[in-house]
Structure formats: structure tokens, C-alpha cells
Amino acid sequence: MKTLVTGGAGFIGSHLVDSLLEQGYQVRVLDNLHPQIHGGDRQLPDYFPHDAEFIFGDVLDEQVLTYALKDVDVVFHLAAQTGVGQSMYEAGGYARTNVTGTAVLWDAIQSVGGIQKVVLASSRAVYGEGTYLCGDCGRVRAQPRHPQGLAEGRWSPTCPHCGAPLRSVATTEKDQPLPTSVYGITKLSQEQLSLTLGCSYDIPVVALRFFNVFGSRQALSNPYTGILATFLARLRSDKPLLIYEDGQQIRDFVHVSDVVQACQLAAASEQANFQTLNVGSGQPISILELARKLLKLRNQDTENEGLKVTGHYRVGDIRDCYADITRARAQLGYEPRMSLLDGLREFSRWSDFQMLVDNTDEAFTELASAGLLRQERAP
């Protein structure tokens, strides 16, 4: 079979390309080699395989897409602008690439014909806040946190019905999406466009909601690529890890190899057609605990100079969200294989041999200038 991987020169896409080639697929890649990911020279990365066909182009260019889709059986649509924080002050760019780009892709799919399946890379950002449990009201979906409460250091959402404290639980695909960022809104739009048009054209679609993906080839110099990449960039620059809020916010970190596993299972499975599936580890961990694990792994100070809880918060961020992966297990046979600790070791070892520029401080300044990074007020 021949596959097209949009965004196939990037972090997740390149690992998927390697795996597809190992499985005997013919692989074509469409990528615009965005400078924020690949540097200003827009050169193919050294790890890009010679036996994959590469097309330089953008998902907004229907002519290029039409050419790239010729004779293709399966499309893995990974091309997107990613990052919650940046999306809040570059809304137009995110909407164009993620939403319009997906619509243009479907125009080209309809024009070319012959496509048998589309696997879409979505995000846990579509949920906004994860799901919580109230002692009186049961399972609830928390509303976005109020700016006044955040300014006063009230980090955790309360029950939308009775105002009681909440306990976070695993989020399922049945839970209503309530995105709190432009990025989340664009990913939900990608899902809706793809599922609607896939049904219209009778082309099976599987939308995979990736949680916090990490691993080798993640862009260490891109401060919006993911918190673990940012942490490693800080450590390589001998700077303390910056922890927003109080560090107790919960996330679900899944290694890129497990995300690739889910993509290939989704392409092969008919049971998951026209559905959305969570792809995570199913294991919650706080940001503070994650930072300490990474510092301990690298034999650095875990309490004093190694990290700094700043009390800052980002507009559009959520408190807790981790995955219920029951549906992916049942319908794909998906099972996370890489433990968090083993994944951290792999990522850390790889990062030591990479050139990087730590742009965290610049991103901090950009967010603050846009009014999107604020600090808890003293009582």
C-alpha cells in the first residue's frame, strides 16, 4: 500500500514514516519544513530516510496536495501548528493551517479519488479541562477556570453544579469537548471536518486524540513543542526548570513509539472507523513529580536550584487531564509499551547529542507581552 504522511518530516511524523517503511509500505511525505521546527534553512533533517519520497509543500496548496495524493491508499494527516500558548496570540495562523488546511486536503481527496482511509492526528486539547468527580454530583465536566480565581492562586476548578472541590478522573471519548485554547478549537474542527466529509465520501476516518507526546526528534529549541522538551532545553542550558501554578496540575505523557503504534493500528482496523480514540498512557502524573523524575534521572538537584515553582499561569491552560484508553484497547488492540521512566531515559540520552538554543525565556516574554502569562497575586 502507498501512504501519504502530511507533516512526515516532523517529530511524530518521522517516527511513523520509519515504522511504515519497516512494515513494507510505500511512503510519501508532504511537509513545509516550518522554521520553528526545522530551523531557518528549511533543510530535511538528517534522520529522514532515503527510501521515503519527499514533497516540499503546504497543506494550504491544493495543487500540491492533488499531486501528493496520486495513487495513495491511506493518508495520515499530522501536519499542523501545535502549542496551546502560542495559539492564543497567533490565532489566524493556527486556524489557517489546522482548519483551512484540513478542508483543502479533503477537497483534494475528493478530487483525486481512490483514498481508502484517513487517520487524523487530533489532541487531548479538544477536551479542555479533563473530567472530574464531585462527591455530591458525581462525574462532571468542569468549566474553564476564572481569571480572578487563578490570580488568587485557586488553581483547581470546582463543581459547576454545587461549587464543591473536585477530584480528577480519566477522561473518556464520551466526555464533551470543551476546548479552552485556539489550538484545541482548531483540532476539534479538524475532527468534525474529517468525520463529516469522510462520511459524505464514504472514506473511513479515525481521529486519534494524542495526549502529551514526548520522545526523540522533538524540537528542543521550540518552546511550544511540549513541556519535557522545554525541560531538557533548560537543563542543557544550566537553567532551573520553570513550573507554572503550583506544579500539581495533572497530565498524561505517552511516548512517541506508542503513538506510532496507535496510528498503524488505526490504519489497519475497520472496527474503529469514523470514531475518535484517546491515545495516551492512561497514567496521571503531576508536572512537579515529572520534573523531579527528570532531574533525578540526570543526577541533578530536585528541590533547590534544579527547579522553580513560579506561581505564573498561562491563559488557556487547564488544570488536569489524563486519558481513559479503554476504547483504543478494545478497538485497536492498543497497549502502551514504553514506561514513563524508560521513555525519559531514551529522550534524555538523545537530547544530549543535539544542538539547541533555549528559547524558553523568549516565549515567556512573548506570552507576558500578549497578556497571556500572568502571576498569582500576593494575598
Image (cartoon, grey):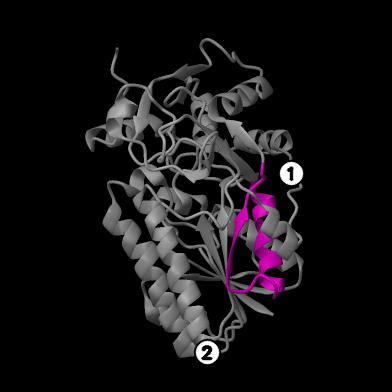
From where the camera sits, is residue 355 visible? no
Tell me where residue 170 appears, x and y as whole percent: 60, 44
Q: What is the quadrant of the N terminus in the image?
A: bottom right
Residue 1 magenta: no
Gap between marks 2 and 1 measured at Cα:
37 Å
The type of residue carrying mark 2 is Gly
Tell me where residue 198 appears, x and y as whole percent: 51, 79
In the visual, does 277 lie left or right of 104? Answer: right
> For the view shown, which residue lies furthest in the top direction?
304
Q: Could you classify mark 2 by the number of other residues whose Cα lies within 10 Å: few (under 14), some (14-19), or many (20 or more)?
A: some
In the visual, does 109 lie left or right of 100? Answer: right
Residue visible at 60% across and 78% down in the picture = 117
Tell me where residue 292 appears, x and y as whole percent: 60, 22
Cβ–Cβ under 8 Å for marks 2 and 1? no
Q: Give the range drawn in magenta.
A: 255-282
The secondary structure type at the circle numbered 1 is loop
Instruction: State the mark number for residue 338.
Output: 1
Which circle's residue, 2 or 1, is located before the other in the chain?
2
Frontmost residue, 173 versus 22:
173
Q: Could you classify mark 1 by the number of other residues whose Cα lies within 10 Å: few (under 14), some (14-19), or many (20 or more)?
A: some
The secondary structure type at the circle numbered 2 is loop
In this figure, which residue is indicated by the disc labeled 2?
A: 113
Tell me where residue 116 appears, x and y as whole percent: 61, 83
The type of residue carrying mark 1 is Met
